[in-house]
Image (cartoon, rainbow, N blue to C red):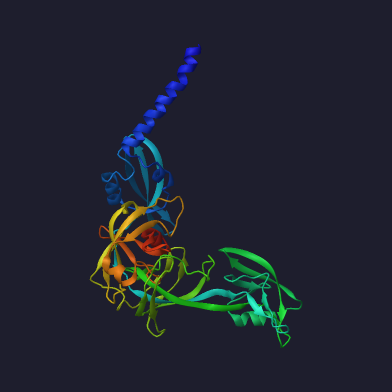
Amino acid sequence: MYKGKKALPSVLFVILFLLCMLIIYSNIKITDLVEISENFYTNYNEVELANEDNRFGRMVSLSFEENEVQTGSNKNKEGTILFKLFGLIPIKKVKVNVLEDEDVYVGGVPIGIYLQTDGTMVVSDTVVDVGSGAVIKNKSLKSGDIIKKINGVVINSAEDISNVLENIKGDTTSVEVIRDNKVKDIEAGLIKNKENKYKLGVWVKDDISGIGTLTFVKKDSGEYGALGHPVITGDSSTIIPVSSGKIYDCNLIGINKGSKNKPGELRAVFLQKNEKGNITKNTPYGIFGNISNLDDLVDTNRCLKIGGRLSVKPGKAKIVSSVSGIREEYDIEIIKANFQSKSSDKSIVFRVTDERLLSLTGGIVQGMSGSPIVQNDKIVGAVTHVFLSDSSKGYGVYSDWMLEQLD
């Protein structure tokens, strides 16, 4: 009886040891299998390539099943991927979206961005006291807040704020704001100016402009994706809600080269008379809308397919950019392609290896966000951020997350 009890731990140890050896020998990517999330885009071709490359290990195979789902009057293609150990034992099943076989024009050119906010944005939460001259910091509202309502009244502009406050009796009012992408109700204190009128005690604006890079344009519909990350309020993480917006033709006038702990930037100008399209969405994965004028934005003879994240792997790739004044492809190396359990704009980690780009910009600079990442003749992602400690390295977002915003 004693020998049997003693032998049981030994047997378990042997089993665990053999399982560990199997995992090591088979190169099973446990972390990737655990982290890969549902609802990414793929197709039969990408699943087959993943099997050929042993993307999740030599003993793990993927099978793909596609089906149509009726949603109201629309038919959408969905699918499932079943992960099998030894081709027999099911170990994971995920729902996926089917990647359509459609052409997109390749971006890579800088564009001017103008957003009209849905609400008003607090750009400074300090004011000067009209009596003492002291700088007062607002205790209720913060820089980056988006003011949506005051005393229940919808706010669209700074003028709306003044109009509402004229009818307020008392030194406080209720304010609905978006802060850190969440709706908050705040009881805000009011102050009086020289004319004895109530004010919120913050500086606000209802529009914002900047520079980004176009990623892709759907050939058949003119829908586009750009930037790869959201337009946010100053130093906060609040994504600016959009009531309307435009993109414009943009002229590059110079480059501030990046260096360690000092990101560079593209210097560019645009005129609001050179309108190219609208902005309908500002999302965690960039801005989206429709382009009405393709002139100077894309080469209509240059089309690629969108690639899903299953097709992204460490190794050689390219980014497309017009930082030299003309659209060019620059060599990069994808260091890591993360299978995250939740979406992120830092999914791809890469290093610029092209000496032309390193000489010109030092690597990745502000304004290059949205530059297409191309691997195996597919747009698989877009540049989003630069490493502060090393401007030759950057992050990217998967292009299928961008594509999802247009569906």
User: Residue at the left extreme?
Assistant: 301
Question: Does residue 117 lie above or below 353 as drawn?
Answer: below
Given residues 267 and 179, the one toward you in this image is: 267
* Residue 45 location (% of width, % of height): 27, 51
Given residues 54 and 101, the one toward you in this image is: 54
Question: Does residue 146 lie above or below 38 as drawn?
Answer: below
Q: Is residue 116 left or right of residue 196?
A: left
Residue at screen point 54% across, 67% down: 236
* Residue 85 location (% of width, % of height): 35, 36
| Quadrant assignment, res 363 | bottom left
Residue at screen point 64% across, 70% down: 141
| Quadrant assignment, res 19 | top left
User: Residue at the top extreme?
Assistant: 1
Question: Does residue 72 lie above or below 166 as drawn?
Answer: above
> In the rendered image, is residue 276 in sight?
no
Q: Is residue 132 left or right of residue 71?
A: right
Given residues 246 and 380, the one toward you in this image is: 380
User: Residue at the right extreme?
Assistant: 170
Residue at screen point 29% across, 73% down: 298
User: Residue at the front extreme?
Assistant: 260
**Quarter of the rendering occupied by the C terminus:** bottom left
Q: Is residue 3 left or right of residue 349?
A: right
* Residue 256 location (% of width, % of height): 38, 75
